[in-house]
């Protein structure tokens, strides 16, 4: 897996961005990071791996 902290940060940012215009308000960045960790763990438990694509 690529740097786990970077992966969590990227996913958490995406979660926050998805909620930025939500009528009930934005999501707390700490909560988004916890959700990101759960997503990464679920992917790992399913046998999937997140990796960076090498540029050509």
Image (cartoon, rainbow, N blue to C red):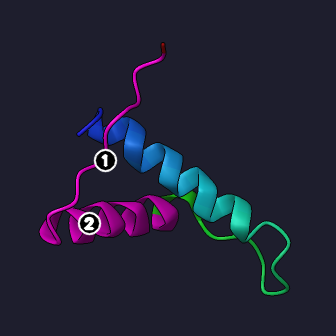
Per the model, the C-alpha gap separating discs 1 and 2 is 8 Å
Q: Is residue 24 above or below residue 46?
A: below
Q: Residue at x 30, y 60 (%)?
A: 40
Q: Is residue 5 above or below residue 35?
A: above
Question: Which mark identifies residue 25?
Answer: none
Look at the image and tell me in which quarter the N terminus lies.
top left
Q: Residue lying at the far front in this picture: please name it.
A: 56
Q: Which structural element holds mark 1? A: loop
Q: Is residue 24 left or right of residue 54?
A: right
Q: Residue at x 65, y 61 (%)?
A: 16
Q: Position of residue 30 (x, y in %)?
A: 48, 60
Q: Quadrant of residue 20?
A: bottom right
Q: Is residue 55 above or below residue 21?
A: above
Q: Which secondary structure type mostly characterizes the magenta part of the structure? A: helix
Question: Which mark identifies residue 50?
Answer: 1
- Looking at this view, is 49 or 34 the one in front? 49
Q: Residue at x 23, y 51 (%)?
A: 49
Earlier-in-chain disc, 1 versus 2 = 2
Q: Is residue 36 magenta?
A: yes
Region of the chain picked out in magenta, as a range: 31-55
Q: Is residue 45 left or right of residue 17?
A: left
Q: Position of residue 23 (x, y in %)?
A: 85, 85
Q: Which structural element holds mark 2? A: helix
Q: Position of residue 4 (x, y in %)?
A: 28, 41
- Residue marked by disc 2: 43
Q: Are marks 1 and 2 in contact (CB under 8 Å)?
A: yes
Q: Residue at x 30, y 69 (%)?
A: 38
């Amino acid at each position: 897996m690529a740097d786990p902290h970077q992966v969590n940060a990227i996913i958490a940012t995406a979660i926050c961005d998805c909620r930025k215009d939500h009528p009930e308000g934005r999501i707390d960045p700490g909560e988004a990071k916890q959700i990101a960790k759960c997503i990464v763990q679920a992917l790992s438990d399913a046998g999937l791996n997140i990796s960076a694509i090498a540029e050509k």
